[in-house]
Image: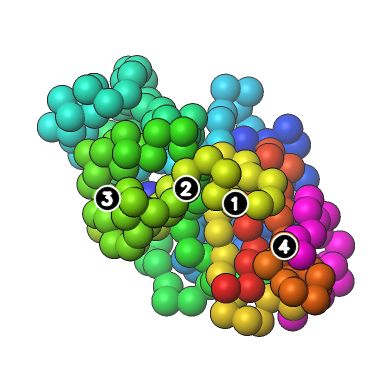
């Protein structure tokens, strides 16, 4: 399975410039605009029908559909299927080979730091978990008794599910989360130096009122939670 984050854009050049400024590198591809920070692969899609979400590639999704259809509406596409979990995120189940050579690296090389995967707020976290499990993700942390569950698939893509009113900051479904192990102040300095617009400066978790977490959005609205954890 190959996992591909997909982000829409109102302006392809502006989105490419945003990602290059953030230290992402272009991945050569004849059919798509792809960028990566080493740990996550992102498709910038200028189609007016593009929506923020994730594309999962497999040769055959039909064996998964029976379980998924009991949990979510499944729509047919020319090259696969479209599913949305209770968070509202669009999940494209693409049938076929994914051609660009890409291997997930141990560490991100982009400005935002260490990518920990995609984060979603769900009004029905139990059903969301069932959807992602039906798509081949395994629960690795958290529980339904808590406000947070983390899953990962064979490709290494992490998905974190949060109950409503868990996160005391702006939340955009879906978003990518970056955890920088106490080094986030340095990351924030670099984000400001590069002139990358910050959507929200977060002081909630700092007793001294220091901005040690930030939220950024790309031109298409995909969120980036850049945190000090």
Q: x, y percentage for residue 186?
A: 74, 80
Compared with 94, 157 (above or below) is below
Callout 3 crowding tier (Cα within 10 Å): few <14, some 14–19, many ≥20: many
Q: Quadrant of residue 106?
A: bottom left
The residue indicated by pointer 2 is 162
Q: Quadrant of the C terminus?
A: bottom right
Compared with 116, 182 (above or below) is below
The residue indicated by pointer 3 is 137
Mark 3 and mark 1 lie on one chain; the one further toward the N terminus is 3
On the question of residue 151 being in view, the answer is no
Q: Secondary structure at mark 4?
A: loop
On the question of residue 141 being in view, the answer is yes
Look at the numbered discs 1 and 2 and tell me whether their residues touch, using CB distance below 8 Å.
yes
Compared with 137, 132 (above or below) is above
Look at the numbered discs 3 and 4 and tell me whether their residues touch, using CB distance below 8 Å.
no
Mark 4 and mark 2 lie on one chain; the one further toward the N terminus is 2
Mark 2 and mark 3 lie on one chain; the one further toward the N terminus is 3
Depth-wise, is mark 3 or mark 1 nearer the camera? 1
What's the magenta region? 186-203
The residue indicated by pointer 1 is 167
Look at the numbered discs 4 and 2 and tell me whether their residues touch, using CB distance below 8 Å.
no
Q: Quadrant of residue 61?
A: top left
- Distance from label 1 to label 2 (Cα)? 8 Å
Camera-nearest residue between 82 and 80: 82
Compared with 71, 202 (above or below) is below
Q: Residue at x 80, y 76 (%)?
A: 208
Q: Secondary structure at mark 2?
A: strand
Query: In screen coordinates, is 132 left or right of 201?
Result: left
The residue indicated by pointer 4 is 204
Query: In screen coordinates, is 9 left or right of 177?
Result: right
């Amino acid at each position: 399975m190959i996992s591909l984050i997909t982000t829409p854009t109102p302006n392809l050049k502006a989105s490419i410039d945003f990602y290059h400024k953030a230290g992402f590198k272009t991945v050569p591809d004849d059919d798509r605009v792809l960028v990566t920070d080493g740990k996550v692969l992102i498709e910038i899609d200028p189609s007016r029908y593009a929506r923020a979400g994730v594309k999962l590639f497999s040769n055959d999704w039909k064996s998964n559909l029976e379980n998924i259809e009991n949990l979510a509406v499944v729509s047919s596409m020319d090259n696969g299927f479209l599913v949305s979990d209770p968070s509202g995120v669009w999940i494209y189940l693409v049938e076929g080979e994914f051609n660009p050579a890409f291997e997930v690296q141990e560490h991100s090389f982009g400005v935002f730091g260490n990518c920990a995967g995609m984060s979603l707020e769900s009004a029905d976290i139990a059903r969301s978990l069932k959807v992602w499990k039906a798509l081949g993700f395994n629960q690795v942390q958290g529980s339904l008794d808590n406000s947070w569950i983390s899953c990962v698939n064979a490709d290494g893509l992490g998905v974190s599910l949060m109950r409503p009113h868990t996160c005391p900051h702006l939340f955009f479904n879906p978003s990518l989360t970056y955890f920088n192990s106490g080094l986030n102040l340095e990351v924030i300095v670099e984000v400001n130096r590069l002139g990358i617009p910050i959507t929200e400066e977060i002081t909630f978790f700092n007793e001294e009122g220091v901005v040690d977490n930030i939220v950024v959005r790309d031109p298409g609205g995909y969120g980036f939670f850049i945190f000090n954890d």
